[in-house]
Amino acid sequence: MAYTQATPINWLSNNMLVQQLSTNGDGTGTVEAIGDYSVAAEEFYIEATRHCHLEQLTIKIEDVGSFDSGFYGNNVTLTNGIVVEKRNAADVVQFNLTPFPIMKTADWAAYCYDLTLFSWGAGNETAAARWQFSSFVKDGVQLSAGEKFVVRFNDDFSGLVRHEFLIEGNY
C-alpha cells in the first residue's frame, strides 16, 4: 500500500543528504512506488535546491512469496521497465543511467552489483540493492539547483508489498 510521508525523510547535518525519492521531489510525497503506472508513467525523484553530490541509491523491493528470476519481485511482468535518469532544470534528460531498462529484479545487479535477496523461511521476501555512483563516475552524480535525479516507472507495480528508493549524498 502506498503512503504519503507527513514530513520529509531527509536530514541535513554536516551537509549530509539522505532522502527517499518521492512523487514531488522533496521527500514529502508518495514514497512507495506501488501502483499501476502502465497507462501513465510515474516518476519518483529528488530535485536539487542547491548543488549536491549523490553518492548512492538504495533500492528495496518486498513481495509475497519467493522471488522469481524471470520477473520483477515474485510475479510482476514488466513491459517497459524502470529507467533512471539525470535531468536538467528544463526537465530534459541529460543522462540515462540505465541504457537497458530494469525488467526483472536481477537486472539491478548489472548497475548495483550489491544485490541481496533476503528470505527468512516464512513471510515476504525482500531484495535490496545498493548502487554506488562513484563506482562508475569518479565524483558520483552531481546535481545543480533545479536538476533532478529521476526513477521512472511505466508498468503495473501494484502486486508488490513495498518498493522504496533512498538517495544519499552531500551538499
Image: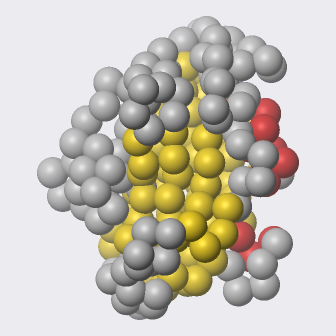
Residue that extends furthest to the left in the rendered view of this protein? 6
x then y, percent, for residue 94: 61, 73
Q: Residue at x 44, y 38 (%)?
A: 41
Up/down of 10 relative to 98, above or below:
below
Q: Quadrant of the C terminus?
A: bottom left
Q: Residue at x 78, y 46 (%)?
A: 100
Q: Quadrant of the N terminus?
A: top left
Q: Residue at x 71, y 70 (%)?
A: 133
Up/down of 91 relative to 79, above or below:
below
Up/down of 76 relative to 33, above or below:
above
Task: Pick whichever, 145 or 11, lies toward us.
Answer: 145
Q: Is residue 133 left or right of residue 25?
A: right
Query: What colour scheme was applied to this rendering of the protein?
Result: secondary structure
x then y, percent, for residue 17: 43, 76
Does the image show residue 13?
A: no
Does the image show residue 29?
A: yes
x then y, percent, for residue 96: 67, 62
Quadrant of the rendered structure where residue 84 is?
A: bottom right
Q: Is residue 8 left or right of residue 31?
A: left
Quadrant of the rendered structure where residue 19 is?
A: bottom left
Q: Is residue 45 left or right of residue 133?
A: left
Task: Pick whichever, 126 or 31, lies toward us.
Answer: 31
Up/down of 59 relative to 13, above or below:
above
Numbered disc total: 0
Q: Residue at x 35, y 52 (%)?
A: 22
